[in-house]
């Protein structure tokens, strides 16, 4: 029996007479056969923050964290969190007493290094920490480690297709291993970390893992009458190669109902083989020579198909591309976003060598879009977003600070720190101003570390100061020593409004002949502010540091933002190891190409880019924005994104994209699909891709969904007339009431087509919700406010409210406020 406790957002499950193995230790205080199990499962999900090193030595002093597997048990190292206090994916079952699940150490951010699950028993207690996993048929070994106060007991348990417990152990202050061999298991399985205490105590668990001993493999039919006899790994496979084999086995089973055997562990058969990673023949791997690290190939030989990349991450790309050739898609994060077809036989591999057009960094930005306290669309965890990004061939997940290290299983991904760093990572005034006031700007005759304007942001630095430059070099070298996998360090000026240094040495770095007046009065327009182009002084500092860092780390890059006062320099050339990040927001309309010869804003944007190219920029990266004001509204910026990426690559040699792509994936999966595909191939036909994704994702509603997305794209492309006053793409001026109504009609028809399929209907309903939010945004910005706009707004609010309640959607704060205002 299930009941929901609305006061605590927890689920109480009462189990009476349930089948389970006999307890190896007695049930404390239980005098009847009914167990009341409180599932302390948070509705919040955790975000993704990279850390320089493990924040808890006690969490990783057993074994090597590098090779700790993060599958099929998820979050077995307790590094991901719900609500900043409980481990994601895990719940607490409480059978007797009073126990609370927590984390040690308590994270400052919602993701950190390997940690500990802590169960604080306030009284004599009994219960278990549990997670549900879906296991391939075979034998498995479950392991964990436990420690705690004297008098406690612990054991491992599995339930599902098989019920089994390990022998209980007496918990001690030192870490002890727990192990359970599961000889025959298949399908949905619940793993339990069970505990019992005789009094108040603390029980801690860490390093929970499931390892396959042997899977029940069978040959897999191939089209043409042959079979896939097995998979090959190198003699000493990397963690990413092992994970690639696991993913291949898992998805082939889901498609065909058969598990291809892994040579050396499972039973294999005579037939075609798939070689993964460096198990591929050397003559095949040589085809990747001189290509970027993320390049990979699929090669179909007479007896062996090779799936291999230039590193572990790109070998995973090869496996997911093979699965894509079989009809698999990952349109949105999580299980709802997967398309895994049923197949009688696997299709032959299409041989190809693949190298990304944007070969440096291709980032997905979380921006707290799915995490506490700002909420998110669905109850989804960090690893779902990471794996969605991986399967769509992004190489970074960024939350605004450091990118997330995906772990050895997922090939780590692109690792860097980013953001405004001078008065933060490099020389935070809170730490250094008292001792080194000369590092901070001279403003009106005194050193001022922090602005007195608006929200009092930190000021820029005295970039000419040699001691500061020496300190900066040492800071960066120390960072790369502590983070050897990191490939880039931010050398980005602070965000404004704030002050620049007025000392003679800094002013001498500016181009001559410019007035100077740092008058920030009349916020926020600052009509009296007069500054010279500051890129020369900034770049002189960055170049100096880059040259010295390159002597130690010739392959590392420094990032430099080039917007606002960072207009192109007139004297400085960009150091080869400086990556200039293009963050210019021209405000051109969404239907205007970057290369439009008539549009003045597009022309100004090109002039900006041309000037930076003439300064020797070799590693241009792009800082994209989507709608940060309305992240749960669909954007439909398909043409603009496809056009911009193509021309940035063709004309300016852009090598990466990492910025504030705030729009939730569920709000506009077509935009995310176009963005991901174009980063790899700038020749992508985005309208054809919309059709491909709709046919794969929406089933019988595909034609209506394709018509919806293309009609909204046409609304942007066909907009005519003068530029609206106060134009900004976030305000959705391009969409007329008639076009919005037409879009809703397509979505209503799509929902009717899949009304009998809850899974397909939910996918359509997410698009309906995003369109309703878009409608509220557009009608709020309508001037004058017409009766038709008011009717549309009421209808959209009703749609959004009904869908939000139906699926318990956790929207982001701006959407919550927008809908609350619409309700008024």
Image: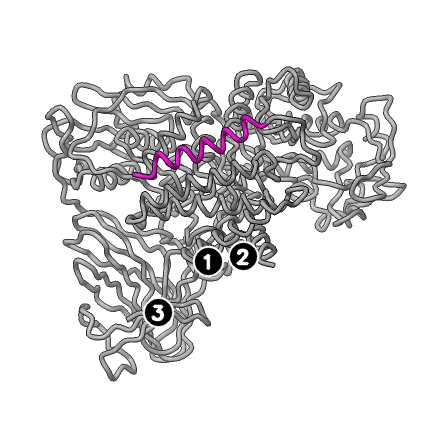
In the rendered image, which residue does mark 1 sit on?
A: 44
Q: Secondary structure at mark 3?
A: loop
Q: Residue at x 51, y 21 (%)?
A: 646
Q: Tell us which disc is closer to us: 3 or 1.
A: 1
Above or below, 813 against 231 in this view is: below
Label 1 near label 2: C-beta < 8 Å? yes
325 left or right, relative to 598: left
Q: Is residue 710 magenta?
A: yes
Marks 2 and 3, Cα distance to the nearest angstrom?
A: 37 Å
Label 1 near label 3: C-beta < 8 Å? no
Q: Quadrant of the N terminus?
A: bottom left
Dominant secondary structure of the residues highlighted in magenta in the image: helix
Q: Secondary structure at mark 1?
A: loop
Q: Residue at x 41, y 57 (%)?
A: 806
Magenta range is: 698-719
Compare marks 2 and 3 and give the one earlier in the sequence: 3
In the rendered image, which residue does mark 2 sit on?
A: 373
**In this view, which residue lies farthest toward the front?**
787
Q: Quadrant of the C terminus?
A: bottom right
**In this view, which residue lies farthest toward the right?**
445
In the rendered image, which residue does mark 3 sit on?
A: 172
Residue 255 location, quadrant: top left
Compare marks 2 and 1 and give the one earlier in the sequence: 1
- Residue 270 drawn at (x, y percent): 9, 29
Residue toward you, 144 or 299? 299
């Amino acid at each position: 029996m299930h009941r929901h406790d609305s006061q605590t957002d927890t689920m109480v499950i009462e189990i009476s007479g349930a089948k389970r193995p006999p307890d190896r230790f007695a049930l404390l205080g239980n005098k009847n056969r009914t167990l009341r199990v409180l599932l302390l499962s948070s509705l919040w999900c955790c975000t993704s923050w990279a850390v320089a090193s493990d924040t808890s030595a006690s969490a990783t002093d057993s074994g090597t964290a590098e090779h700790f597997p993060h599958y099929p048990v998820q979050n077995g190292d307790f590094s991901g969190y719900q609500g900043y206090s409980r481990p994601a994916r895990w719940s607490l079952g409480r059978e007797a007493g009073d126990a609370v699940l927590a984390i040690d150490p308590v994270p400052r951010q919602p993701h950190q290094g390997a940690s500990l699950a802590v169960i604080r028993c306030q009284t004599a207690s009994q219960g278990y920490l549990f997670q549900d996993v879906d296991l391939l048929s075979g034998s498995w070994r479950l392991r964990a480690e436990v420690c705690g106060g004297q008098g406690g007991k612990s054991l491992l348990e599995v339930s599902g297709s098989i019920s089994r417990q390990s022998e209980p152990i007496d918990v001690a202050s030192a870490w002890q291993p727990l192990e359970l061999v599961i000889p025959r298991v298949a399908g949905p399985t619940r793993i339990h970390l069970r505990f019992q205490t005789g009094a108040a105590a603390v029980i801690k668990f860490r390093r929970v893992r499931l390892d396959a001993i042997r899977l029940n493999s069978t040959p897999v039919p191939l089209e043409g009458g042959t079979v896939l006899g097995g998979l090959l790994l190198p003699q000493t496979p990397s963690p990413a190669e092992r994970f690639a084999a696991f993913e291949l086995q898992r998805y082939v089973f889901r498609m065909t109902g058969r598990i291809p055997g892994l040579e050396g562990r499972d039973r294999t058969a005579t037939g075609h083989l798939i070689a993964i990673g460096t198990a591929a023949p050397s003559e095949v791997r040589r085809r990747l020579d001189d290509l970027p690290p993320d390049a990979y190939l699929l090669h179909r030989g007479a007896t062996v198909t090779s799936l291999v990349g230039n590193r572990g991450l790109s070998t995973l790309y090869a496996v997911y591309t093979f699965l894509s050739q079989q009809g698999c898609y990952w349109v949105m994060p999580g299980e709802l976003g997967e398309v895994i077809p049923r197949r009688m036989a696997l299709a032959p591999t299409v041989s190809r060598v693949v190298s990304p057009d944007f070969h440096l960094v291709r980032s997905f930005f979380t921006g707290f879009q799915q995490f506490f306290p700002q909420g998110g669309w669905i109850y989804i965890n960090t690893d779902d977003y990471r794996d969605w990004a991986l399967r769509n061939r992004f190489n970074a997940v960024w939350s605004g600070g450091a990118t997330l290290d995906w772990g050895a299983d997922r090939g780590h991904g692109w690792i860097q720190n980013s953001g405004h760093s001078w008065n933060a990572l490099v020389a935070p005034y809170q730490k250094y101003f008292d001792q080194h006031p000369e590092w901070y700007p001279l403003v009106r005759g005194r050193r001022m570390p922090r602005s007195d304007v608006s929200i009092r942001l930190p000021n820029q630095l005295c970039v000419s100061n040699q001691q500061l430059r020496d300190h900066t070099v040492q800071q960066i070298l120390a960072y790369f020593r502590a983070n050897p996998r990191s490939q880039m360090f931010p050398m980005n000026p602070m965000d404004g409004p704030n002050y620049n240094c007025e000392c003679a040495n800094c002013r001498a770095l500016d181009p001559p002949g410019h007035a100077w007046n740092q008058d920030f009065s009349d916020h926020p327009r600052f009509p009296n502010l007069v500054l010279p182009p500051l890129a020369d002084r900034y770049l002189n500092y960055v170049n100096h540091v880059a040259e010295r860092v390159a002597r130690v780390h010739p392959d590392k890059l420094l990032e430099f933002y080039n917007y606002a006062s960072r207009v192109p320099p007139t004297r400085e050339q960009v150091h080869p190891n400086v990556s200039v990040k293009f963050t210019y927001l021209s405000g051109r309309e969404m239907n205007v190409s970057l290369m439009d010869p008539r549009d003045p804003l597009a022309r100004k944007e090109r002039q900006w880019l041309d000037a930076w190219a003439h300064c020797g920029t070799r590693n241009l990266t792009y800082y994209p924005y989507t709608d940060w004001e309305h992240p749960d509204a669909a954007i439909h910026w398909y043409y603009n994104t496809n056009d911009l990426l193509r021309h940035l690559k063709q004309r300016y040699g852009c090598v990466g994209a990492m910025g504030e792509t705030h729009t939730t994936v569920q709000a506009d999966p077509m935009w995310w699909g176009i963005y991901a595909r174009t980063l790899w191939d700038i020749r992508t036909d985005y309208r054809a891709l919309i059709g491909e994704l709709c046919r794969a994702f929406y089933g019988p509603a595909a034609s209506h969904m394709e018509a919806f997305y293309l009609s909204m794209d046409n609304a942007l492309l066909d907009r005519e007339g003068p530029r609206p006053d106060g134009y900004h793409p976030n305000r959705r001026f391009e969409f007329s009431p008639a076009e919005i109504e037409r879009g809703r009609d397509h979505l209503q028809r799509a929902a009717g087509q899949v009304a009998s399929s809850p899974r397909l209907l939910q996918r359509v309903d997410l698009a309906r919700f995003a369109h309703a939010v878009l409608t509220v945004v557009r009608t709020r910005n309508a001037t004058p406010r017409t009766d038709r706009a008011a009717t549309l707004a009421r209808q959209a609010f009703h749609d959004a409210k009904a869908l939000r309640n139906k699926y318990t959607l956790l929207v982001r704060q701006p959407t919550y406020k927008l809908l609350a205002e619409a309700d008024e």
